[in-house]
Image (cartoon, rainbow, N blue to C red):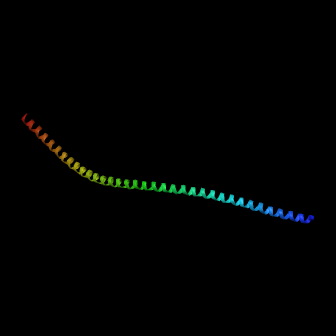
Amino acid sequence: MDILTVVAVVSCVCTVVGIIIGWLGQADKSKRRVIEEAERSVLLLSDVQHVKKAVDDLSVESRAINRLLIDVDKRVGTVETTLSSVTGEMKELNDRVVVVEKETSSLGKSVAVIKERINLSTEREG
């Protein structure tokens, strides 16, 4: 075998070994890429699950708040009704107070007249 044949054979062997090493390196790189993508997918799925749980929690809280608001609305309605009733009763009482004040004033005048008559009668007798 001459030197050119040996060089050609060594060259072919090196080429085949280079192809094999390159293929193995590419396969390893592809594996790492797949693993990294799987890790990102798992993290993304985990984040989505956390967001979903947070949304569910907010939904439950929202329903509870809505129930409280409905209860508060009912209570406000009751208070408004009671206030309206009390306002009417206060107006009636105020009207009665005005009447009583008029009657008291009239009675006061009558008492003053009676006292004056008593004083006059006692002065005539005395």
Vertical comparison of 111 with 70: above or below: above
Task: Please state, as top left, top right, bottom left or bottom right, where the N terminus lies in the image.
Answer: bottom right
Q: How many marks?
A: 0
| Residue nearer the viewer, 55 or 34 | 34
> What residue occupies the far front of the structure in this picture?
1
Residue 7: percent from left, percent from top: 89, 63
> What residue occupies the far right of the structure in this picture?
2
- Which residue: 57% across, 58% down? 45
Residue 44: percent from left, percent from top: 59, 57
- Which residue: 90% across, 66% down? 5
Residue 61: percent from left, percent from top: 45, 54
- Which residue: 54% across, 56% down? 51
> What residue occupies the far top of the structure in this picture?
126
Please give left or right for residue 81 compared with residue 65 in the image: left
Residue 118: percent from left, percent from top: 11, 39
Vertical comparison of 80 with 6: above or below: above
Q: Which quadrant of the view contains residue 16?
A: bottom right
Please give left or right for residue 18 compared with residue 57 in the image: right
> What residue occupies the far left of the structure in this picture?
125
